Amino acid sequence: MAETPAVLLVGGMGTRLRPVVPNAPKPLAAVGNKSFLELLVLQLSVQGIRRIVMCTGYMSDQIEAHFGDGRNWGVAIQHSKELQPMGTGGAVKLAQSFVQDSPEFFVMNGDSFMELDFGRMLQFHCGHGAVMTLAARRVENAGRYGTLQLGSDQRITGFLEKTGSEAPGLVNAGVYVFDQDLLRRIPDGPCSLERDIFPGLVSHGMYALEHRGVFIDIGTPEDYARAQEICDCLYEAASYKQ
């Protein structure tokens, strides 16, 4: 798994978080005495994933200046910089040249953390011959997320848009395993994985692996404040060698 790269989506503008983090890109928002993005890099490196591609955009210079080539974190970081907003799908496609030598690779949202075993997720993905596997998490209030519909074999049968309902649900936790076939299906130019790509691939073998660990998305001021409250728990989870 050491040769399997991880693509981190860190180019978004983070408009909802800007009232409390006005002068930095969202992934560089501080959680404790480090940036949230360092938490993700720590989690990857502890589990032996040391090839990282950062898909930058908004305030990209800050991310590139902070991490450089990754040597201070014991990883190798390359930067794929978008010159216009590309969306999550467009950003992954733009980074194609960095991962084209890898049959599978991880993709992660740069503003959420999910405690999981990357090796187990990769094994599940390969064992099911999946075109994509995502980490899923059951939450008490799924209102601000889209929810997943699954068959009995954990195959994804549908994606439901955000409803605003405060009911529990199984949600996309923002960590994926992609194979090269999925990457080839993403068109050049701006697009969204969640809205434009995934719904059209339901019949091609997409799976969800449910996890029960710590999960947080720092996209809103309320959840960013909660990340500060559980800071020690997040670093403990990120440092755990599965």
Image (cartoon, grey):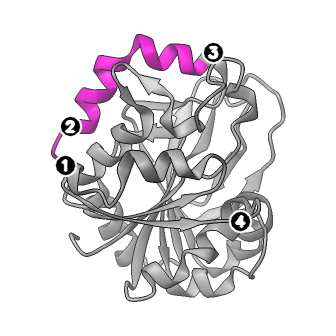
Callout 4, which amino acid? Leu
Helix, strand or loop status at disc 2: helix
The residues tagged by marks 1 and 4 sit, at their Cα atoms, a distance apart of: 32 Å
Q: Which mark is residue 113?
A: none
Q: Secondary structure at mark 3?
A: helix
* x and y, in percent, of residue 200 in the image: 77, 74
Measure the C-alpha gap from mark 1 to mark 3.
29 Å
Tell me which amino acid carries mark 1. Val
Q: Nearer the viewer, mark 3 or mark 4?
A: 4
Q: Position of residue 216 (x, y in %)?
A: 50, 30
- As drawn, which residue projects farthest toward the top? 229
The residue segment tinted magenta is: 223-242
Mark 3 neighbour density, 10 Å: few (under 14) some (14–19) many (20 or more): few
Q: How far is mark 1 from mark 2, CA to CA?
A: 6 Å
Q: Amino acid at mark 3?
A: Glu
Q: Is residue 36 magenta?
A: no
Residue 215 visible in rendering = yes
Check disc 3 and report the residue beneath it. Answer: 222
The residue singled out by tag 1 in the image is 46
Residue with the mark numbered 4: 83
First-in-chain label (3 vs 4): 4
Q: Quadrant of residue 99?
A: bottom left
Could you say which disc has been placed on residue 239 in the image?
Answer: 2
Measuring 31% from the left and 57% from the top, which residue is drawn there?
Answer: 118
- Label 3 – label 4 distance at C-alpha: 30 Å
Residue 120 x %, y %: 28, 60
